[in-house]
Image (tube, grey):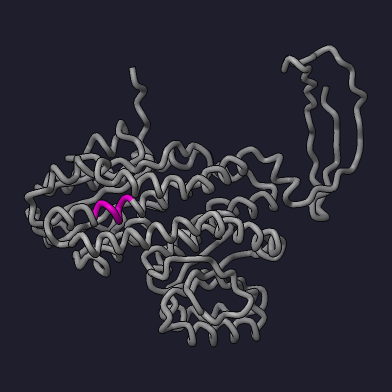
Amino acid sequence: MDSACKLVYHGKRVEKKIKLIIINEKNESLKNIHIKPLKQTIHLSAMDYGRGNLMAEKMLQYLEEQPAVWNRILENRSQLFQPLEKKFFERKIKRVVLVGSGSSYNASLLAAQFYQEMLGLEAQAEVPARIGTLPPLLDPETTLIFAVSQSGLSISTIQAIHLFRKLGFTVAGFTADESSPVAGACDVHQLIDCGDEFIGPKTKGMTASVLTLYLAGMRLCSVTGRLNCEKEATVCSKFLRSFAAAPQNIARCKEFCKANLRNLSEQPFYTIISDGTGYAAACEGALKILETLCVPAYSYEFEEYLHGINNLIAPGICNLFVPVNPANFQWMWKLDDYCRANGCSDFVITSAPDSGFTNALELEGSGCACTQPFETLLLFQIFSVLGSEYKGMNCDKSKFPNFCSLMETKAVRRPVH
């Protein structure tokens, strides 16, 4: 029967009913047992509370699976990208336009920067609503469109696919579901091999999207002669080094979150400041916090923050710095010191070697900026789980369950017969 309990969690009273189910040694439910109703006070720590949150446990499982997912994608890249290679082997691709929304847009931002800086391939990322007058400025013969949607259900991405194909562009769809509407709307489908991710905001699916996009660009440049074997091997060795550090980084991020859980979780809003490849990762970090803690979280490129946005500096403001580019370290030190002196709660997360920041969460990395998302994003993923637990929020439960259907942002998946 139901037994009433009063839960006291970090000094906050939480009213909750707990249903007790007695199971015998044969794993059978015993129904006719009388249990006297009990009133008691139970004190829970953050981690005790977390063990009871099955949704959070599953999301933690997903993010802990990431190193294995990354290594599998990297190891199977020759076979994984065969459909893409066959479709574009003889095409002289000069530029790639990546289209996606939410986490898929953030993954596209990272990929576009990787294509330009590491592969010398012109690239840009856009949300579907902003493609507007872009198509007439591009040559369908030399431009490739990558439509990115992990679920494959984004209606705006599907609309963008139809527009580009109508104008003669070839579109490759990147999804984790080959039977999804996005996959079916494209000229060729590229699998994001992240496995199932049914619960919570995307973690392993997002980082798997980044890696898949990275490798897809590398494979296309390799088969068309733009990328030589030596450079490909060098870049892949950086990936392997970063992936090998992930279990240790996950452990460090958990320890950091536990040690700072109350201070981090009770902030009214968050400002994430980064540079270089860190900016797109900061966008994803802000999205994760917003999706799970349901409070404002903003990401700013470091240089842009200095031009007016610095007026946010005030007591009680929470800044999370993610320094990437060594050329900016000295200036970010100054900004961090200034913010702290004016009452801000500042945290620093970095995988850059010898950053020089005091009291920073220092993570292991490859030493290459292109792998930074596989390193620092772990902190934001883990905090989104533990922070939402601390606040007693279900990270898998939408604040507005009918919002997507009302605004028609997601396609309805058709049943398979």
Query: Does residue 40 sit above or below 206 in this rendering?
Result: above
Q: Residue at x 12, y 56 (%)?
A: 224
User: Which secondary structure class fits the magenta region best?
Assistant: helix
Between 169 and 358, which is closer to the camera in this rendering?
358
Q: Residue at x 59, y 86 (%)?
A: 338
Verify whether residue 159 appears in magenta. Answer: no
Q: Which quadrant of the figure contains the N terminus?
A: top right
Q: Is residue 232 left or right of residue 281?
A: left
216 in magenta:
yes
Q: How many marks?
A: 0
Residue 291, percent across and down? 53, 52
* Rendering coords of residue 35 (x, y %): 89, 22
Q: Looking at the image, which residue is at 54% across and 87% down?
A: 334
Q: State whether residue 133 appears in this view.
A: no
Nearer to the camera, 266 or 254: 254
75 lies left or right of 68: left
Is 196 displayed left or right of 35 in the figure?
A: left
Question: Which residue is rendered at x = 36% and y = 54% of the image?
Answer: 210
Q: Position of residue 158 (x, y in %)?
A: 27, 42
Is residue 297 positioned above or below 291 on the image?
Answer: below
Q: Please give the range of residues in magenta.
A: 212-217
- Identify which residue, 177 or 1, lies in the foreground: 177
Please tell me whether residue 79 is drawn above or below residue 293 in the rendered image: above
Look at the image and tell me in which quarter the C terminus lies: top left
Q: Quadrant of residue 30?
A: top right
**Residue 346 visible:** yes
Decide: is 344 above or below 405.
below
Residue in the foreground of this view, choosing between 31 and 250: 250
